[in-house]
Image: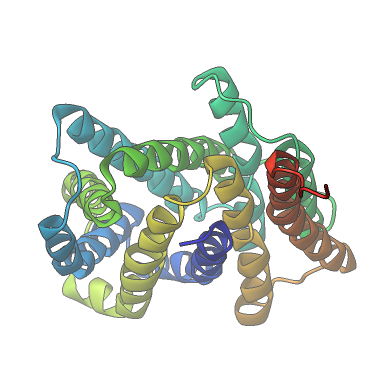
Amino acid sequence: MTRIQANLLLLLAAAIWGGGFVAQSTAMKAIGPFWFIGLRFMIAAVAVLPFMLFEARKAPVATAPRHLKLYLLTGLALFGGAATQQIGLQTTTVTNSSFITGLYVVIVPLIAVVFLRRSPHWIIWPGALMAVSGIYLLSGGQLSAMTTGDLLTVVCAIFWAGQITLAGITVSETGRPLALSTTQFAITGACALAIAVVSEPISWAAIWAAAPEILYVGIFSSGVAFSLQIIGQRYTTPSQAAIFLSAEALFGASLGALLLGETMPPLGYVGCALMFTAMLLVEVVPEIARRRASDRLKPSPNLG
């Protein structure tokens, strides 16, 4: 897979996640956040499991204890992000949630620099700032006073940044994106259900009422989109992945306006343009630099 194809997969994942914001918000009318998280990720694990078993037959690398530790850490980061985002949606809007979640665009490169001692391509920094500025403009250039949901979503952005970074490391070492997807879904689902059993009431009527949202988010936002993320991250860097995945805010804000009546201000369209410009820059500039470097290394034609 080329880097361009990988980044397009990440953009598709972002579009699916954008629809998930709406489903996550409306589901809270019928079911508690931890039941919702537990059911969606268990459905996702079951949906991806057959593909994981097929992948295991051709696994290029044997699973080592370090890989199991990475699977666990990635799953716990996913659970932290899902839980704080879902609870936060009870007291914040879809637009605000999608904006604040998008802060992982800046956090991912910071993790790479501080913890992994890796310096990302220089275009990542202006690209990340443009993407975050675009997300901010989607909310009209201002946010209401921070609610508990907003603060929880800030924590969510930190967890997402950790999950993106860990997923990139894990899949590059194991070469098994579907094994990572299934494992992180199962860990997240198990953690959420364990909390839900002791903290939230449940009934078949509630599950039935939230069934469309659970199925959409479980199969598409979780099973399909996270798997696309893991597969795409095999062929691109975590920093570039974060830029493309940040487009979920664009899709989330647009669908929030279309389906929930949340208005997009005129500045929102400027934000859309900024985000797409950031994605194009992150895609094109490194490619131009590589081609120029490759041309310099080519031997000069013999004109003698």
On screen, 116 above or below 278?
A: above
Query: Could you say which quadrant of the image residue 263 lies in?
Result: bottom right
User: In the current view of this chain or complex, which residue is farthest to the front?
Assistant: 304
Q: Going by the image, does 4 lie left or right of 202?
A: right
Q: Going by the image, does 251 lie left or right of 152?
A: right
Q: Going by the image, does 31 lie left or right of 153?
A: left
Q: Position of residue 132 (x, y in %)?
A: 73, 46
Q: Position of residue 172 (x, y in %)?
A: 36, 41
Q: Position of residue 256 (x, y in %)?
A: 63, 72
- Viewer-proximal residue among 151 and 184: 184
Q: Going by the image, does 41 lie left or right of 112?
A: left
On screen, 220 above or below 148?
A: below
Q: Residue at x 56, y 18 (%)?
A: 114
Q: Quadrant of the N terminus?
A: bottom left
On screen, 136 above or below 156?
A: below
Q: Position of residue 107 (x, y in %)?
A: 60, 34
Query: Could you say which quadrant of the image residue 264 lies in?
Result: bottom right
Residue 244 in view, yes or no: yes
Q: Residue at x 14, y 65 (%)?
A: 54
- Viewer-proximal residue among 297 and 117: 297
